[in-house]
Amino acid sequence: MAKTFTINNNTAAIYRCTSISRTFFKCKCFFLTKSQPSFPLRTITVRPLLLHFTPNISINIYRERFSFVNRTIKNNSNNICTEIISETYIDPVKVKDKMTVTAAPFIKDGSIMVNGKVVLTTDVPPNVAVYPVADGGAFIGGSSTLPGSRHVFSLGVLQEYKFTCLFRHKIWWMIPRFGSLGSDIPIETQMLLLEVREESAVSVDDSSRQSVDNGTLYVLLLPVLEGQFRTTLQGTPTNELQFCVESGDVQVQTSRVTEAVFINSGDNPFELIRNSIVILESHKGTFTHINHKKKPTHLDWFGWCTWDAFYKDVNPQGINEGLESFLEGGCPPKFLIIDDGWQDTINEFQKDGQPLIEGTQFSTRLISIKESSKFMESGVDIQCNDLHQFVQFIKGKYDLKLVYVWHALIGYWGGLLTSSEELEKYNPKMRYPVQSPGNVGNLRDIALDSIEKYGVGLIDPRKIGDFYNDLHSYLSKSGIDGVKVDVQNLVETLGAGYGGRVELTRQYQRALEESVARNFEENNLICCMSLNSDSIYSLKKSASARASEDFMPREPAFQTLHIASVAFNSLLLGEIVVPDWDMFQSNHYTAEFHGAARALGGCAVYVSDKPGMHDFKILKKLVLPDGSILRAKYAGRPTRDCLFLDTVMDGKSLLKIWNLNKLSAVVGVFNCQGSGNWPLKDGPEYNLDSSSKPLVLSGHVSPLDIDYLGEVTDESSCGDLAVYSFHTGSLSRLSKEGRIEVSLSTLECEIFTISPIRVLDETLEFAPIGLIDMFNSGGATESVSFTPGPLVKVEARGCGRFGAYSSKKPIYCTVDGKKEEFVYDADKGLLVVKLEGECKIRNIHICY
């Protein structure tokens, strides 16, 4: 790619990029004059700051940023040009108002402009600058007169525009917040999405405006990592938007950042977020987009986690009883997570026989990489002397495909016991967490409060790779297939003396990913308690991460918050990992609500049922008889018309979550109102007993709710769509702009499968729905083809009732070559064929 700047009136130099590294661009320099052809000058090396912003900066900026000495072109007898160029850097803060910009954000008259609209107003300070990058985005940076490990810069005033932001309300977890003023933006905000409508925008320079569909522009601000620093956003009572840059180590200081916040805009919010993450992936090089990662194998199988079934009292006998009860109910899990409770630990602050002192459980430390003897004390119906024998036993008896175990990023909650002879080779040292002001300003956490008091036996970062490799090697030899790694954000509080929070997080994360790749056949890793930007933007290989605080069966006010949190968090997380919605319990009063959400979340499906306490009616709407699930294509996210609505606390809005399958789309509608309040936000108290009156809300579902509908349509689509309602069993034909009304009480939901209708000939229109007794019906349809006759051929996965829209009644249907009876409802156009027998890919032929 060529870069051009003017040297004098009739001469221009062109840099043509020949190679790129993280630190330098190497370029061939060419000169052009009015009277001479171009010819190479020499190869030069230039810092990227001087070159890689050129697509959106006028030539005048380059004349400011460079001074040229000896601007003489000398052509010798060999026609080789020679010249001396000296580069002098000019602070872009001083020249920012001279930029001529098309789509990229820039500063003009003290305001930050995006796509010709004022987004942040009122005297953006002179120490803040915008640095455009390719594709219309830009970085925002700032400078200070003094170096420091933490800086706060103002970006101007934010008001009038609706926004959704994602912020950390606890050190481990992230939730959404909604508003329209800068004062509504909490500290520790890690994503900010603005809705900038045409009619309310202050416009300038029509010639620089890109076309925006339906008059709405979406502006995205992502505070990111720069070197050893991480950034967050925050508002002030006077509606200023600020960005905070911190290293977490007083010895790691700077006075200047140039890539602290990424800002971009577009007319499709989902494409905007995706494209921005792809740009950052390429530019930063510290993480990888989910499309470029190997996904762990547990995602497509039904699982069971031991946590809410046993908590820390997990043992082989209980696991065996649980697996047996699933098998008896006809819904056996194919993957198992043995959660916290299996490891060999000690609590120095808890004496035997004395009552538990609240909080001391988090001071427990690891004393061995092997399983606890207590874990093996409870026998099963064969003798198992160690973890290896037990894993062999349950895999053989219950046909488990995968067994994972839990461990903390630092080994255990309190780290390693520093006096352990077995673990001394990892050089653990006692360290005491130091929280950032952002964490302290939000909700305190009992676990971290305890760890602050009792300290952490922190593994030497130079030894962390050895620790993980030894642990995972032992587990792999014991038959374990993967790990769930918890308590990850604790590392951000321990960066002092280790290069800061970002540097320590990267060291631990890199060592973890390398060990998982070395010791387990697949990328079988679930990250947990890891929703800080330090971790998010350091995930090079990790492809699955928990997206919300735990499912808490004994917290009735948290159930709706859980669903809404994951849906909104997936806007960001879904571009970097497959969001993990956590376990739920199938016999819980909210099981249908949670199960439906996971069916369209594009995520793993696993439960934490106690042995013998299952609702198999719920489970069989999620799980096929072979233990596989019908997982949707993407991360389930709120529909566009829900993006800026508080679907938990505004008292009127339903939450809609959309996704795609191979040949159809799916939308779930959830009433999350009237059941709980967001943390750190005041709201009414709810009486959630059986006598309380549910809040009934109405809304609608439309094919327009699916942003990527074009991915499941082709040239045979007529433009109309078949819409199947899971609970009512109704089938409707809608235009793309059509809608179906829906009314739901608190904690009720409905799922709609939306399938494009294909014109097969002048007399026949057809649309596959899928397995209509499964929440995500369309996930069962693999392919549809048509041959003259007419004959429709459908490949479907699973067994049960397969439904389709058909404009006329077939003559007969076959499944795997055998004629099968079918039911046809001419009024609805609903065709149903029963798929009996083995759960596999079935060939359905429908003859007309």
Image (tube, rainbow, N blue to C red):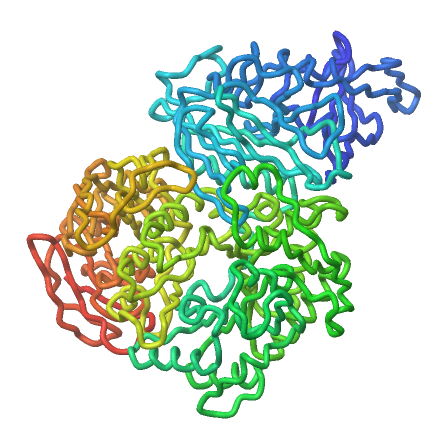
In the picture as drawn, the residue positioned furthest to the left comes out as 827
Instruction: Judge by depth and name the residue closer to the eye, 364 or 712.
Output: 364
In the picture as drawn, the residue positioned furthest to the top comes out as 9
Instruction: Judge by depth and name the residue closer to the eye, 305 or 114.
Output: 305
Instruction: Identify the residue at image location x=61%, y=28%.
Output: 139
Instruction: Identify the residue at image location x=29%, y=63%.
Output: 588
The quarter of the displayed image where residue 542 is located: bottom right
As drawn, is 389 to the left or to the right of 330?
right
The quarter of the displayed image where residue 458 is located: bottom right
Measured along the vertical axis of the image, is residue 766 above or below residue 120?
below
Measured along the vertical axis of the image, is residue 381 above or below residue 689?
below
How far across and how far down the image is residue 349, in percent? 62, 65
How far across and how far down the image is residue 302, in percent? 39, 68
How far across and how far down the image is residue 537, in percent? 60, 45
In the picture, which quadrant includes the C terminus? bottom left
Is residue 516 visible in the rendered image? The answer is: no
In the picture as drawn, the residue positioned furthest to the right comes out as 77
Instruction: Identify the residue at image location x=32%, y=68%.
Output: 623
As drawn, is 81 to the left or to the right of 576?
right
How far across and how far down the image is residue 498, in percent? 75, 48
Measured along the vertical axis of the image, is residue 321 above or below residue 677?
below
In the picture, which quadrant includes the N terminus? top right
Disc tally is 0
Instruction: Identify the residue at image location x=25%, y=51%.
Output: 688
The quarter of the displayed image where residue 134 is located: top right
As drawn, is 474 to the left or to the right of 182?
right
Instruction: Judge by depth and name the residue closer to the eye, 535 or 196.
Output: 535
In the picture as drawn, the residue positioned furthest to the bottom comes out as 382
Is residue 515 visible in the rendered image? The answer is: yes
